[in-house]
């Protein structure tokens, strides 16, 4: 008699017999862990919009790179890191200029479209960049993702202590000698790298599903910094892998499945949390 | 020994002069109440002492030297502009982030530091806040957490910027008493800024009144007088003493409270109009 466990083991074994599935799991795994960890700080700092903006700007870089015969991932990295550093250097001035940012983002998408226009394999390339195509990832791309991931996480580890301090208490961190501007600029460059990773799996338009959904859910569920980071990375990994498996059996697009799981994870966490939260809002209300 | 010394110092932010040609000296172990209208420079003065704002003219000296950013001998409670209520982080991690938070690398909290944090939290009666999320604390509880943090690093000088904000009246008294006892036991110098003078009268050694670009430092009896305050507020000020309380009045209206209750009184005013109409 076959138990449920052996059924599951067998299905997984069959799924993993395909090269493209193994590659997809590896690529999504690396990108998810990086996105979950970096995204935790993005949510903590209330800068999720920056993640969104960097993705859009990256689109122009990715399509521009393809046009001049360079792999799209390097165009993405170059444009997002440059944009991240520029946003960091502008600092607080950027927050009051939502309209300007919106216009610049639309312009970036427009340029991306123009570059695609001159590239012949228009539709497939556009879809892959905007919505991801993790089932087409090859060994070279996995190596690139691992390399980028190591750089990203090393940089994050190097600035983590002052990053946490200045995220939680900017006034005190400044008084204690933390270089706030440098930290926030370096962090946005790190976010840019994570966006580039995440975009290889779920596409530019859906980076939120790996970079914001899991960390936001994690912060609703636990309040410790380390447990929050671990849960965020774990949720991102689980959602990415479950998404690929679901896509394999349903034939739905992978990015759609991951986006659904990410939204599900967030709203389930929210639902669990709301009943406890409601009375405290009333108690501390002004 | 003078802990803080201003010698003909001018402090300016973006070309606007906040304090002009100001001189005073604060001795070790003094508990100084810092008062004055909004925008008089209470926060600016603290930022200068922290080394975040060099004087444009003159000298500022802290512990006998030019102020240096990141001086561990200074405990600071900022008048916080951050949106703390949104932080889903427990109190322990919040405070721990300030322990050598300026160093590079991955943070690690040693056993000794953890014990120290818990002891300081217990001292301000906030032990249970270690495990609670900031988003679930009341304004008063968050303020208590910030106070514990300011006391944490064995400071020799405490800069407390409006520590009574968002505390209810009874707990305000507790905070004043707690800071007073903590500072006296350890011979710590305290700058304590506030809106209300009367609560501080029993605790402070001297008062530093800021206003109109000028500063006056002295005992309450010396500084809180009609001539001195008229100069600082730049208008006619009356000082009325009654029943151990001091009321600072401008055209018959209390100025300390005017800042706080402006919205309320405006509201009532409108109601009155409705009645008459």
Image: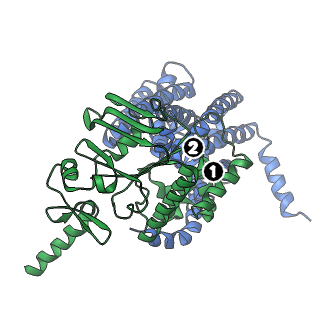
Chain colours: A blue, B green
Asked if residue B121 lies left or right of residue B169, the reply is right
Question: Disc 1 is attached to a residue of which chain?
Answer: A
Whether labels 1 and 2 share one chain: yes
Residue B211 visible (yes or no): yes
Name the one closer to the observer, B173 or A64.
Answer: B173
Find residue A190 and report its image quarter: top right
Q: Residues within 10 Å of mark 1 (few under 14, many from 20)?
A: many
Find residue B261 and report its image quarter: bottom left
Q: From the top left corner, tell me how far across and down residue B102 is, in percent.
A: 57, 36
Which residue is the extreme one toward the right?
A: A1
- Residue at 47% of width from left, 42% of height from top? A52
Q: From the top left corner, tell me how far across and down residue B156 is, in percent.
A: 54, 44
Which residue is the extreme one toward the bottom?
A: B275
Asked if residue B44 lies left or right of residue B67, the reply is left
Quadrant into which the C terminus of chain A falls? bottom left
Q: From the top left corner, tell me how far across and down residue B210 is, in percent.
A: 29, 47
Q: What is the distance, in whole Å, between disc 1 and disc 2 at their CAs?
A: 9 Å
Question: What mark, if any, has residue A225 been given in the picture?
Answer: 1
Q: On the image, numbered disc 2 is attached to which residue?
A: A164
Residue A256 visible (yes or no): no
Q: Is residue A77 above or below residue B194?
A: above
- Residue at 29% of width from left, 37% of height from top? B22
Q: Is residue B272 above or below residue A260?
A: below
| Residue contact at pointers 1 and 2, CB within 8 angstroms | yes
- Which element carries disc 2, helix, strand or loop? helix
């Amino acid at each position: 008699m076959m138990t449920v466990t052996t059924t599951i083991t067998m299905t997984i074994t069959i799924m993993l017999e395909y090269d493209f599935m193994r590659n997809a799991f590896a690529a999504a795994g690396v990108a998810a862990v990086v996105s979950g960890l970096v995204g935790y700080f993005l949510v903590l700092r209330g800068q999720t919009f920056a993640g969104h903006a960097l993705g859009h700007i990256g689109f122009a870089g990715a399509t521009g790179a393809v046009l001049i015969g360079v792999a799209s991932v390097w165009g993405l990295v170059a444009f997002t890191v440059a944009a991240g550093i520029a946003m960091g250097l502008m600092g607080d001035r950027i927050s009051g200029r939502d309209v300007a940012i919106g216009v610049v983002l639309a312009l970036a998408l427009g340029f991306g479209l123009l570059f695609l226009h001159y590239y012949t394999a228009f539709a497939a390339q556009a879809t892959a960049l905007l919505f991801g195509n993790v089932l087409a990832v090859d060994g070279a791309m996995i190596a690139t993702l691992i390399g980028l991931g190591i750089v990203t996480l090393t940089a994050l580890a190097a600035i983590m202590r002052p990053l946490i301090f200045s995220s939680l208490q900017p006034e005190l961190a400044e008084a204690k000698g933390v270089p706030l501007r440098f930290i926030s600029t370096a962090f946005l460059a790190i976010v840019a790298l994570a966006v580039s990773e995440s975009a290889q799996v779920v596409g530019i338009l859906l980076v939120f599903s790996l970079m914001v959904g899991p960390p936001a859910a994690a912060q609703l569920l636990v309040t410790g910094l380390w447990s929050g980071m671990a849960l965020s990375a774990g949720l991102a990994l689980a959602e990415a892998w479950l998404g690929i498996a679901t896509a394999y059996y349903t034939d739905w697009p992978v990015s759609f499945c991951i986006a659904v799981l990410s939204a599900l994870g967030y709203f389930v966490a929210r639902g669990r949390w709301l009943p406890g939260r409601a009375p405290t809002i009333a108690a501390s209300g002004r | 020994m003078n802990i803080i010394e201003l010698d003909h110092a001018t402090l300016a932010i973006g070309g606007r002069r906040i304090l002009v040609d100001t001189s005073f000296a604060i001795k070790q172990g003094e508990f100084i109440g810092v008062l004055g209208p909004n925008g008089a420079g209470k926060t600016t003065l603290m930022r200068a002492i922290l080394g975040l704002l060099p004087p444009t003219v003159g000298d500022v000296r802290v512990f006998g030297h030019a102020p240096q950013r990141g001086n561990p001998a200074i405990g600071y409670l900022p008048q916080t502009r951050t949106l703390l209520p949104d932080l889903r982080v427990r109190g322990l991690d919040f405070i721990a982030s300030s322990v050598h938070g300026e160093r590079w690398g991955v943070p690690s909290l040693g056993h000794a530091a953890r014990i120290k944090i818990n002891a300081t939290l217990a001292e301000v009666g906030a032990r249970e806040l270690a495990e609670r999320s900031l988003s679930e604390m009341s304004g008063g509880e968050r303020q208590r957490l910030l106070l514990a943090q300011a006391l944490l690093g064995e400071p020799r000088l405490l800069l407390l910027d409006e520590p009574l904000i968002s505390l209810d009246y009874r707990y305000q008294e507790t905070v004043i008493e707690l800071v007073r006892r903590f500072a006296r036991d350890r011979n710590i110098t305290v700058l304590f800024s506030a809106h209300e003078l009367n609560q501080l009268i029993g605790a402070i050694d001297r008062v530093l009144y800021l206003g109109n670009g000028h500063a006056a430092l002295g005992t309450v009896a010396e500084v809180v007088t009609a001539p001195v305050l008229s100069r600082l507020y730049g208008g006619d000020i009356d000082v009325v003493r009654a029943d151990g309380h001091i009321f600072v009045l401008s055209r018959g209206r209390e100025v300390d409270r005017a800042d706080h209750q402006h919205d309320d009184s405006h509201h009532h005013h409108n109601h009155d109009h409705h009645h008459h109409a």
